[in-house]
Image: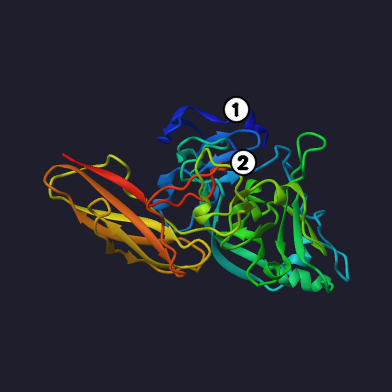
Amino acid sequence: MGAMVSPAMAGESVTLNLPGGPNQRALTAAFPQKGRMILQRTRPPLLETPFAVFDRGVFTPNDQFFVRWHWAVIPEQVDVAAFRLSVRGHVNNTLALSMSDVLALPRVEMAAVNQCSGNSRGLFEPRVAGGQWANGAMGNAKWTGVRLRDVLDRAGVKGGAVAVRFNGLDEPVVDGAPDFMKSLDIDHARDGEVMLAYQMNGEQLPLLNGFPLRLIVPGWYSTYWVKMLSDIEVLDAPDETYWMTTAYRIPDTPGASVKPEETGFKTVPITRMVPRSFFTNLTDGTTVGPGASVPVRGIAFGGDCGVAKVEMSADGGTTWQATALDRDEGTYGFRRWTSSVTAPAGGVQTLKVRCTNTKSVVQTAEPNWNGGGFMRNVIESVRLTVA
């Protein structure tokens, strides 16, 4: 990771069209195990996936999977032979599991979207503080690992347990800063879906995506997906640490939305994702010929459940038609959708796409706003220029 000293590729940049600017971001290929990425921040590393990558398939390649760390003190290497996963707290047996111990547990696989809580924050108006992501702080992978429940059962959870807290190998930069830790209610932790992954897309986890173990919390934002997981603590009282009680909180309102000047509202921890859909083969301003038949495709995900349908509008949202959904790779993963449109004789044509999930939640027609820049899922649009 010493390559982070000068990560930008000479002269290469990408335009993100963020309303608050700046629009230009450098491209970098200097981070370990990573290809061309949009550089949002060097220390700690924030690397965004170039959006064209999402048109290549429903699984995001490991070398272009987004990266987000909270603290800059990240191990540059991990000695797998010496690594131990601690399981402690309100348990019958304190454990120190080697990777061999973890690999000996029953193996499971799951496709799931990993999305930063602040994905698309740079599109908020008025602008809010934080990493100014466009739409590329997300990715979908097939995760391979073991159930958290199986690990907890091996330790033996005592009666009265209420939560499980997770910690990784990253450390705060200065003394007294809050160590990054997240927790789940005990029933959620033991639901059989939460898992500890040691592979993504059939390959070893990249270092910057959490090697050697990463917590996978399907359907929840990635703030809970603790990387370089090294410590699991079962709690007999609610977790009152900083990253649960102060950070990553949203207004307790529909869509987590408030007015920019609003104050005095109740907040709750951000948890479940909401449905989203995107165009992947067209960008705003794409030029097409008069009367041309234009293939349209994209990706969608249901958030905390599956995709029920994806609809596209070719008239700016006045009418909607169902698109064709490709193979379902798993409840929590991306679904590719396809359609086509006939361009008018001239002018500008506005296409819109919206996803409805299996809980009947539909993307919103108007963007939400909150001070954290969290949970954006407004209906996406692209304008085609006919010429």
Query: How many numbered discs, if any?
Result: 2
Give residue 41's mark: none
Q: Looking at the image, which residue sits at the far front? A: 264
Front-lying residue, 249 or 166: 249
Mark 1 is surrounded, within 10 Å at the Cα level, by few (under 14), some (14 to 19) or many (20 or more) other residues, namely few
Q: Please name the amino acid that badge 1 sits on.
A: Ser
Q: Secondary structure at mark 2?
A: loop
In the depicted structure, whether residue 295 falls above or below residue 97:
above
Horizontal and vertical percent position of residue 316: 26, 50
Which residue carries the number 2 mark?
Answer: 32
Q: Which of the 4 image quadrants contains residue 177?
A: top right
Q: Is residue 328 left or right of residue 96?
A: left
Q: Quadrant of the N terminus?
A: top right
- Of 157 and 50, which appears nearest the observer? 157
Q: Is residue 314 above or below residue 132?
A: below
Specify the quadrant that holds the C terminus: top left
Residue 121 in the image, given as x and y percentages of width and height: 51, 42
Q: Which residue, given by chain and number where applicable, does mark 1 sit on?
A: 6
Q: Quadrant of residue 125?
A: top left
Q: Where is residue 64 shown, x and y percent of the image?
A: 52, 46
Q: Earlier in the sequence, mark 1 or mark 2?
A: 1
| Camera-nearest residue between 177 and 197 | 177
Res 78 seen here: no
Task: Decide if residue 214 is on the left or right side of residue 354.
Answer: right
Q: Position of residue 22 (x, y in %)?
A: 46, 28
Q: CA distance from mark 1 to mark 2?
A: 13 Å
Q: Is residue 135 visible?
A: yes
Instruction: Tell me what residue is drawn at x 65 percent, y 34 percent.
Output: 43
Residue at x 45%, y 52% (from the top left corner): 377
Check disc 1 and report its element: helix, strand or loop.
Answer: loop
Three-letter code, disc 2:
Pro
